[in-house]
Image: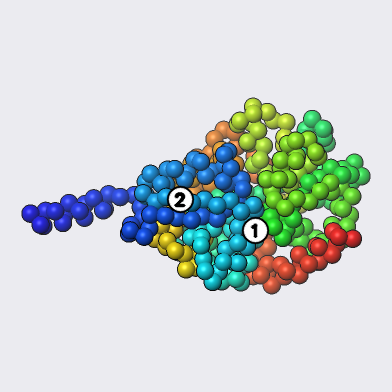
Protein backbone atom coordinates (compact mmCIF):
# COMPACT_ATOMS: atom_id res chain seq x y z
CA UNK A 1 0.00 0.00 0.00
CA UNK A 2 2.85 2.42 0.87
CA UNK A 3 4.43 1.69 -2.52
CA UNK A 4 1.14 2.41 -4.28
CA UNK A 5 0.74 5.68 -2.38
CA UNK A 6 4.30 6.71 -3.27
CA UNK A 7 3.70 5.89 -6.92
CA UNK A 8 0.49 7.93 -6.90
CA UNK A 9 2.27 10.92 -5.36
CA UNK A 10 5.04 10.75 -7.96
CA UNK A 11 2.46 10.56 -10.75
CA UNK A 12 0.66 13.65 -9.43
CA UNK A 13 3.90 15.61 -9.17
CA UNK A 14 4.84 14.65 -12.71
CA UNK A 15 1.53 15.95 -14.02
CA UNK A 16 1.95 19.45 -12.53
CA UNK A 17 2.61 22.31 -14.98
CA UNK A 18 6.30 23.07 -15.55
CA UNK A 19 5.79 26.45 -13.86
CA UNK A 20 4.28 25.10 -10.63
CA UNK A 21 6.18 26.26 -7.54
CA UNK A 22 6.72 24.01 -4.53
CA UNK A 23 7.54 24.48 -0.88
CA UNK A 24 5.73 26.14 1.99
CA UNK A 25 7.79 29.31 1.61
CA UNK A 26 7.02 29.61 -2.11
CA UNK A 27 3.39 30.67 -1.92
CA UNK A 28 4.20 34.33 -2.53
CA UNK A 29 6.00 36.19 -5.31
CA UNK A 30 6.94 39.87 -5.41
CA UNK A 31 7.38 41.41 -8.86
CA UNK A 32 8.62 44.89 -9.76
CA UNK A 33 7.49 46.12 -13.16
CA UNK A 34 6.64 49.19 -15.21
CA UNK A 35 3.31 51.02 -15.29
CA UNK A 36 1.96 49.84 -18.63
CA UNK A 37 2.55 46.17 -17.78
CA UNK A 38 0.58 46.54 -14.54
CA UNK A 39 -2.20 48.75 -15.92
CA UNK A 40 -5.75 47.53 -16.42
CA UNK A 41 -5.13 47.24 -20.16
CA UNK A 42 -1.67 45.69 -19.79
CA UNK A 43 -0.43 42.12 -19.55
CA UNK A 44 -0.77 41.74 -15.79
CA UNK A 45 -4.58 41.34 -15.57
CA UNK A 46 -4.38 38.67 -18.27
CA UNK A 47 -1.45 36.59 -17.06
CA UNK A 48 -1.05 37.05 -13.30
CA UNK A 49 -4.38 35.36 -12.38
CA UNK A 50 -3.53 32.48 -14.72
CA UNK A 51 -0.16 31.99 -13.02
CA UNK A 52 -1.72 32.15 -9.57
CA UNK A 53 -4.30 29.50 -10.49
CA UNK A 54 -1.72 27.19 -12.04
CA UNK A 55 0.96 27.54 -9.37
CA UNK A 56 -0.88 28.27 -6.14
CA UNK A 57 1.39 31.29 -5.66
CA UNK A 58 0.00 34.70 -4.67
CA UNK A 59 1.63 37.50 -6.64
CA UNK A 60 2.29 40.96 -5.24
CA UNK A 61 2.76 43.14 -8.31
CA UNK A 62 4.40 46.50 -7.65
CA UNK A 63 4.34 49.11 -10.41
CA UNK A 64 7.40 51.36 -10.25
CA UNK A 65 6.93 53.87 -13.08
CA UNK A 66 9.23 52.93 -15.95
CA UNK A 67 11.35 49.83 -16.50
CA UNK A 68 14.45 51.80 -15.56
CA UNK A 69 12.85 52.87 -12.30
CA UNK A 70 11.84 49.27 -11.51
CA UNK A 71 15.44 48.18 -11.95
CA UNK A 72 16.70 51.12 -9.90
CA UNK A 73 14.46 50.15 -6.98
CA UNK A 74 15.86 46.62 -7.03
CA UNK A 75 19.38 48.07 -7.07
CA UNK A 76 18.66 50.29 -4.06
CA UNK A 77 17.39 47.24 -2.18
CA UNK A 78 20.31 45.06 -3.25
CA UNK A 79 21.59 44.34 0.27
CA UNK A 80 18.11 43.41 1.50
CA UNK A 81 16.09 42.38 -1.57
CA UNK A 82 12.34 42.59 -1.34
CA UNK A 83 11.48 41.72 -4.93
CA UNK A 84 11.85 38.30 -6.50
CA UNK A 85 11.49 39.26 -10.18
CA UNK A 86 12.04 42.46 -12.16
CA UNK A 87 10.12 42.73 -15.44
CA UNK A 88 11.20 45.12 -18.20
CA UNK A 89 14.99 44.77 -18.27
CA UNK A 90 15.76 45.03 -21.96
CA UNK A 91 18.91 44.65 -24.07
CA UNK A 92 19.79 48.26 -23.30
CA UNK A 93 19.30 48.06 -19.51
CA UNK A 94 21.08 44.72 -19.20
CA UNK A 95 24.51 46.27 -18.67
CA UNK A 96 23.22 48.47 -15.87
CA UNK A 97 21.73 45.46 -14.09
CA UNK A 98 24.92 43.44 -14.47
CA UNK A 99 27.15 46.26 -13.28
CA UNK A 100 25.01 46.50 -10.16
CA UNK A 101 25.17 42.74 -9.61
CA UNK A 102 21.49 42.65 -8.76
CA UNK A 103 20.36 39.61 -10.77
CA UNK A 104 20.83 35.85 -10.56
CA UNK A 105 21.16 33.49 -13.52
CA UNK A 106 18.40 31.06 -14.47
CA UNK A 107 18.03 29.12 -17.71
CA UNK A 108 14.39 28.30 -18.27
CA UNK A 109 13.58 25.21 -20.36
CA UNK A 110 11.26 27.45 -22.39
CA UNK A 111 14.22 29.35 -23.79
CA UNK A 112 14.62 26.59 -26.37
CA UNK A 113 11.57 28.05 -28.18
CA UNK A 114 13.16 31.51 -28.37
CA UNK A 115 15.30 32.26 -31.45
CA UNK A 116 19.00 32.67 -30.77
CA UNK A 117 18.91 36.24 -32.09
CA UNK A 118 16.63 37.25 -29.20
CA UNK A 119 18.72 35.68 -26.44
CA UNK A 120 20.57 38.87 -25.62
CA UNK A 121 22.03 37.61 -22.34
CA UNK A 122 24.17 34.48 -22.77
CA UNK A 123 24.40 34.18 -18.97
CA UNK A 124 20.57 34.06 -18.65
CA UNK A 125 20.38 36.66 -15.90
CA UNK A 126 17.63 38.10 -18.07
CA UNK A 127 15.13 35.98 -20.00
CA UNK A 128 13.56 37.54 -23.14
CA UNK A 129 9.79 37.43 -23.43
CA UNK A 130 8.95 39.92 -26.21
CA UNK A 131 10.55 42.33 -28.67
CA UNK A 132 9.83 45.27 -30.92
CA UNK A 133 11.29 48.20 -32.83
CA UNK A 134 11.34 51.82 -31.74
CA UNK A 135 9.51 54.12 -34.12
CA UNK A 136 7.93 57.53 -34.33
CA UNK A 137 4.14 57.23 -34.20
CA UNK A 138 2.26 60.05 -35.86
CA UNK A 139 -1.31 61.29 -36.04
CA UNK A 140 -2.25 60.94 -39.71
CA UNK A 141 -5.13 63.38 -39.27
CA UNK A 142 -2.57 66.09 -38.53
CA UNK A 143 0.49 64.95 -40.47
CA UNK A 144 -0.04 63.95 -44.09
CA UNK A 145 3.65 63.54 -44.98
CA UNK A 146 5.47 61.80 -42.14
CA UNK A 147 9.24 61.95 -41.61
CA UNK A 148 11.26 59.26 -43.35
CA UNK A 149 14.43 59.53 -41.29
CA UNK A 150 15.80 60.80 -38.01
CA UNK A 151 17.23 63.77 -39.88
CA UNK A 152 13.90 64.70 -41.43
CA UNK A 153 12.45 64.82 -37.93
CA UNK A 154 14.48 68.01 -37.42
CA UNK A 155 12.61 69.87 -40.19
CA UNK A 156 11.00 73.20 -39.34
CA UNK A 157 7.56 71.76 -40.08
CA UNK A 158 7.89 69.52 -37.01
CA UNK A 159 8.67 72.34 -34.59
CA UNK A 160 7.34 71.54 -31.07
CA UNK A 161 5.71 68.39 -32.48
CA UNK A 162 7.62 65.52 -30.86
CA UNK A 163 7.27 63.83 -27.48
CA UNK A 164 10.28 61.84 -26.27
CA UNK A 165 11.28 60.06 -23.04
CA UNK A 166 14.20 60.52 -20.66
CA UNK A 167 16.94 57.89 -21.19
CA UNK A 168 17.80 58.00 -17.48
CA UNK A 169 14.38 56.69 -16.42
CA UNK A 170 12.75 55.16 -19.49
CA UNK A 171 13.61 52.10 -21.57
CA UNK A 172 12.24 53.66 -24.78
CA UNK A 173 14.05 56.89 -23.88
CA UNK A 174 17.35 55.07 -23.65
CA UNK A 175 16.50 53.14 -26.80
CA UNK A 176 15.99 56.35 -28.76
CA UNK A 177 19.28 57.77 -27.50
CA UNK A 178 21.05 54.58 -28.61
CA UNK A 179 19.21 54.79 -31.93
CA UNK A 180 20.77 58.21 -32.53
CA UNK A 181 24.18 56.87 -31.49
CA UNK A 182 23.80 53.91 -33.87
CA UNK A 183 23.06 56.27 -36.77
CA UNK A 184 25.33 59.25 -36.00
CA UNK A 185 28.11 57.73 -33.91
CA UNK A 186 30.11 60.29 -31.95
CA UNK A 187 28.28 63.06 -33.82
CA UNK A 188 25.00 62.25 -32.01
CA UNK A 189 25.14 65.43 -29.83
CA UNK A 190 25.00 67.49 -33.00
CA UNK A 191 21.88 65.65 -34.07
CA UNK A 192 20.22 66.31 -30.72
CA UNK A 193 21.07 69.96 -31.10
CA UNK A 194 19.28 70.02 -34.45
CA UNK A 195 16.38 68.03 -33.03
CA UNK A 196 15.81 70.31 -30.02
CA UNK A 197 13.38 72.74 -31.76
CA UNK A 198 11.15 69.78 -32.74
CA UNK A 199 10.81 68.50 -29.17
CA UNK A 200 7.70 69.54 -27.27
CA UNK A 201 8.56 67.69 -24.07
CA UNK A 202 10.59 64.82 -22.63
CA UNK A 203 8.66 62.66 -20.16
CA UNK A 204 9.94 60.27 -17.49
CA UNK A 205 8.15 57.20 -18.88
CA UNK A 206 6.61 55.81 -22.05
CA UNK A 207 3.11 55.66 -20.57
CA UNK A 208 3.08 59.34 -19.63
CA UNK A 209 4.47 60.35 -23.03
CA UNK A 210 2.06 58.22 -25.04
CA UNK A 211 -0.81 59.49 -22.93
CA UNK A 212 0.05 63.07 -23.85
CA UNK A 213 0.15 62.04 -27.51
CA UNK A 214 -3.26 60.37 -27.53
CA UNK A 215 -4.66 63.39 -25.66
CA UNK A 216 -3.63 65.54 -28.61
CA UNK A 217 -0.72 67.41 -27.00
CA UNK A 218 1.57 66.69 -29.97
CA UNK A 219 1.25 64.86 -33.31
CA UNK A 220 4.39 62.67 -32.96
CA UNK A 221 5.59 60.42 -30.14
CA UNK A 222 8.37 57.92 -29.60
CA UNK A 223 6.91 54.44 -29.28
CA UNK A 224 7.07 51.14 -31.16
CA UNK A 225 6.43 50.17 -34.76
CA UNK A 226 3.68 47.87 -33.47
CA UNK A 227 1.81 50.60 -31.55
CA UNK A 228 -0.76 51.17 -34.34
CA UNK A 229 -1.94 47.59 -33.78
CA UNK A 230 -3.62 48.64 -30.53
CA UNK A 231 -5.68 51.35 -32.19
CA UNK A 232 -6.68 49.08 -35.06
CA UNK A 233 -7.60 46.14 -32.83
CA UNK A 234 -9.43 47.99 -30.05
CA UNK A 235 -10.49 51.34 -31.48
CA UNK A 236 -11.06 50.19 -35.07
CA UNK A 237 -8.99 53.16 -36.20
CA UNK A 238 -5.90 53.44 -38.38
CA UNK A 239 -5.43 57.12 -37.50
CA UNK A 240 -2.12 56.51 -35.69
CA UNK A 241 0.67 55.14 -37.86
CA UNK A 242 4.34 54.25 -37.57
CA UNK A 243 6.81 56.21 -39.70
CA UNK A 244 9.22 53.88 -41.53
CA UNK A 245 12.76 55.28 -41.47
CA UNK A 246 15.22 54.59 -44.27
CA UNK A 247 18.13 54.57 -41.79
CA UNK A 248 16.66 51.61 -39.92
CA UNK A 249 15.00 51.16 -36.54
CA UNK A 250 16.58 50.33 -33.20
CA UNK A 251 15.48 46.98 -31.78
CA UNK A 252 14.36 46.40 -28.20
CA UNK A 253 14.26 42.93 -26.67
CA UNK A 254 12.39 42.94 -23.37
CA UNK A 255 13.10 40.52 -20.57
CA UNK A 256 12.70 39.63 -16.92
CA UNK A 257 15.26 38.63 -14.33
CA UNK A 258 15.36 36.97 -10.93
CA UNK A 259 16.77 39.16 -8.16
CA UNK A 260 19.90 37.87 -6.47
CA UNK A 261 18.90 36.71 -3.00
CA UNK A 262 15.21 36.65 -3.96
CA UNK A 263 13.09 35.72 -0.92
CA UNK A 264 11.01 33.30 -3.02
CA UNK A 265 13.52 31.81 -5.46
CA UNK A 266 11.53 28.74 -6.55
CA UNK A 267 8.40 30.79 -7.18
CA UNK A 268 10.52 33.23 -9.21
CA UNK A 269 11.85 30.41 -11.38
CA UNK A 270 8.31 29.13 -11.84
CA UNK A 271 7.20 32.56 -13.05
CA UNK A 272 10.06 32.85 -15.55
CA UNK A 273 9.04 29.45 -16.93
CA UNK A 274 5.45 30.67 -17.13
CA UNK A 275 6.47 33.78 -19.08
CA UNK A 276 7.73 31.54 -21.88
CA UNK A 277 4.67 29.30 -21.85
CA UNK A 278 1.99 29.52 -24.54
CA UNK A 279 -0.47 30.80 -21.91
CA UNK A 280 1.65 33.92 -21.39
CA UNK A 281 3.08 34.35 -24.88
CA UNK A 282 -0.28 34.31 -26.68
CA UNK A 283 -1.40 37.36 -24.65
CA UNK A 284 1.56 39.54 -25.66
CA UNK A 285 0.46 40.68 -29.16
CA UNK A 286 -2.81 42.31 -28.07
CA UNK A 287 -1.81 43.42 -24.57
CA UNK A 288 1.85 44.49 -24.62
CA UNK A 289 1.40 45.15 -28.36
CA UNK A 290 4.82 43.64 -29.03
CA UNK A 291 6.10 40.60 -30.87
CA UNK A 292 6.22 37.50 -28.61
CA UNK A 293 9.63 35.95 -28.04
CA UNK A 294 8.47 32.39 -28.57
CA UNK A 295 8.71 31.43 -32.23
CA UNK A 296 5.63 29.22 -31.85
CA UNK A 297 3.23 32.08 -31.11
CA UNK A 298 0.82 33.12 -33.92
CA UNK A 299 0.16 36.81 -34.58
CA UNK A 300 -3.33 38.29 -35.04
CA UNK A 301 -4.38 39.89 -38.33
CA UNK A 302 -4.06 43.39 -36.84
CA UNK A 303 -0.27 42.97 -36.82
CA UNK A 304 -0.33 43.68 -40.55
CA UNK A 305 -0.37 47.33 -39.37
CA UNK A 306 2.95 46.91 -37.55
CA UNK A 307 6.01 48.15 -39.41
CA UNK A 308 8.69 45.47 -39.74
CA UNK A 309 11.80 47.48 -40.62
CA UNK A 310 13.96 46.34 -43.49
CA UNK A 311 17.01 47.32 -41.44
CA UNK A 312 17.38 46.84 -37.69
CA UNK A 313 19.94 48.57 -35.50
CA UNK A 314 21.58 47.46 -32.27
CA UNK A 315 24.62 48.35 -30.20
CA UNK A 316 26.47 45.52 -28.50
CA UNK A 317 25.94 45.13 -24.74
CA UNK A 318 29.71 45.41 -24.20
CA UNK A 319 29.80 48.78 -25.95
CA UNK A 320 26.77 49.97 -24.02
CA UNK A 321 28.41 48.88 -20.77
CA UNK A 322 31.55 50.85 -21.62
CA UNK A 323 29.98 54.04 -22.94
CA UNK A 324 26.40 54.28 -21.64
CA UNK A 325 27.14 56.68 -18.79
CA UNK A 326 29.23 58.89 -21.07
CA UNK A 327 26.48 59.01 -23.69
CA UNK A 328 23.84 59.89 -21.11
CA UNK A 329 26.05 62.59 -19.57
CA UNK A 330 26.63 64.08 -23.02
CA UNK A 331 22.90 63.92 -23.73
CA UNK A 332 22.09 65.76 -20.49
CA UNK A 333 24.59 68.50 -21.35
CA UNK A 334 23.16 68.81 -24.85
CA UNK A 335 19.45 68.98 -24.03
CA UNK A 336 19.95 71.31 -21.07
CA UNK A 337 21.51 74.03 -23.22
Residue 209 marker: none
**Name of the residue lying farthest toward the right:** 156
Foreground disc of the pair 2, 1:
2
Residue 68 marker: 1
Q: In this view of the protein, can residue 238 be seen by the observer? A: yes
In the image, residue 69 sits, relative to residue 324, either above or below, namely above
Q: Secondary structure at mark 1?
A: helix
Q: Is residue 108 left or right of residue 44?
A: left
* Among the 4 quarters of the image, the one containing residue 174: bottom right
Disc 2 residue crowd, few under 14, some 14–19, many 20+, Cα 10 Å: some
Q: Is residue 20 left or right of residue 195?
A: left
* Among the 4 quarters of the image, the one containing residue 319: bottom right
Q: Is residue 115 left or right of residue 237?
A: left
**Name of the residue lying farthest toward the left:** 1
Quarter of the figure with the N terminus: bottom left
Task: Determine contact: label 2, label 1, CB under 8 Å.
Answer: no
Residue appearing at x 76%, y 44% in the figure: 221
Q: Nearer the viewer, residue 209 or 151?
A: 209
Question: Considering only order in the chain, which callout, 1 or 2, is on the residue closer to the N terminus?
Answer: 2
Q: Which residue is mark 2?
A: 59
Residue appearing at x 69%, y 72% in the figure: 322
Residue appearing at x 69%, y 48% in the figure: 206
Amino acid sequence: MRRLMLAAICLCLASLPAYAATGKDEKKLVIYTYDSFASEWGLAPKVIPAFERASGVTVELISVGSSGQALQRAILEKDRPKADVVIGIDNNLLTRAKQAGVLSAYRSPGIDNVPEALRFDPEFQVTPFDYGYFAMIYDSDLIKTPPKSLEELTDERFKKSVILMDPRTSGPGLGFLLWTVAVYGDDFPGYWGRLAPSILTITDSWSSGYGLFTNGEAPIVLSYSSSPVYHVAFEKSDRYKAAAFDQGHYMQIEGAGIVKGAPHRKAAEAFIDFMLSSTFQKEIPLTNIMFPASANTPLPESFSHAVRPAKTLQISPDTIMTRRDQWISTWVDTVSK
